[in-house]
Amino acid sequence: MILATVGMQLPFPRLIRALDAIAGRHGLHVVAQAIEPVAGLVHLDQRASLSPAEFDALAQACTLIVGHAGIGTMLSAAAHTKPLVLFPRIAALGEHRNEHQLATARHFGGQVGITIAHDAAELEHACLRHDAPPYRPAEQPRYRALVSTVADFVSAD
Amino acid sequence: MRLRTAFVGHQVTFVTTRDGVAQRAGVVARLVPDCNRHERLRVIACAARLALLILRRRPQVIVTTGALPGVIGIALGRAIGARTLWIDSIANGEQMSLSGRRARTLATQCLSQWPDVAATEQVGYSGAVL
């Protein structure tokens, strides 16, 4: 099962429609937290809202998390150690107030466990991969650097 | 929570504004009311709870990622001579939060988790939880 999320604030019909087409073509089971479900889609299990506990249970059970390029999406994949696909919102298409999700995608795109998809074709490719490693930010050098800085601060006299 | 390993070997009191978050991570935390700068009464309630906690626990170090309750915690910590560290939330990738800007002048050390933001806001960068 693939868990998709558009975050907590704005709907993201471009992502939802693309996932519906992919689910239909390949017979994939996709559950999507969509905020405002897009009418007329038959291949996707869309949910307007999920409680934190429901979301956690789905995140634990899924094989892949797909979402808009928000920090919440990344924290979910990290908490449940799942491979992650980020599909950034594009402000030029009216999907957000500025292009910070493209900046987020650039910033995190090189990390193990994160695949960036900018369009439906890249998204389809990413959803069909079976060898994607999970996202483990605690193994990143920048995580270890922060923890050691905090540990030094806490222990200094 | 993602920085927990940095506190190993120390006596730690966790404080949160959201019930359930700490429990999900398997940690016991003290609950204080959340507040923002538009709700004066909640700010007072939050500050009162934090003041009680800080006076009772007498921390030597306070580490926070925000937001306004974190600023209050740092101000109170400073008053009792604690060393204070502000780590601006990873969510602030475009600019530092208003709370972070306030904390910058109060905290012993102030970090952003985004190198570009750290450079613009003239605070430290030393890695990130993601």
Image: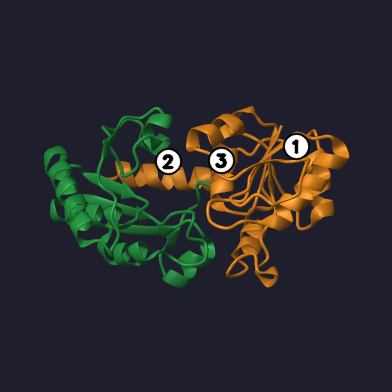
Q: Distance between the residues labelled 2 and 1?
A: 26 Å
Report the residue at 63% width, 27% height from top. A61
Chain ID of residue with mark 3: A
Task: Give residue B98's position: percent from left, percent from top.
Answer: 36, 66
Q: Where does label 2 land, which residue?
A: B3
Q: Where does label 3 land, which residue?
A: A76
Instruction: Output the letter for the chain in orange.
Output: A
Chain ID of residue with mark 2: B
Amino acid, disc 3: Ser
Which color scheme is applied? by chain
Q: Going by the image, does A60 lie left or right of A27? A: left
- The reply to whether residue A116 is in sight is no
Please tell me whether residue A89 is drawn above or below residue A63 in the rendered image.
below
Do badges 3 and 1 share one subunit? Answer: yes
Q: Is mark 3 on a helix, strand or loop?
A: helix
Please tell me whether residue B111 is drawn above or below residue B2 in the rendered image.
below
| Residue A132, numbered label | 1
Task: Give residue B109's position: percent from left, percent from top.
Answer: 33, 58
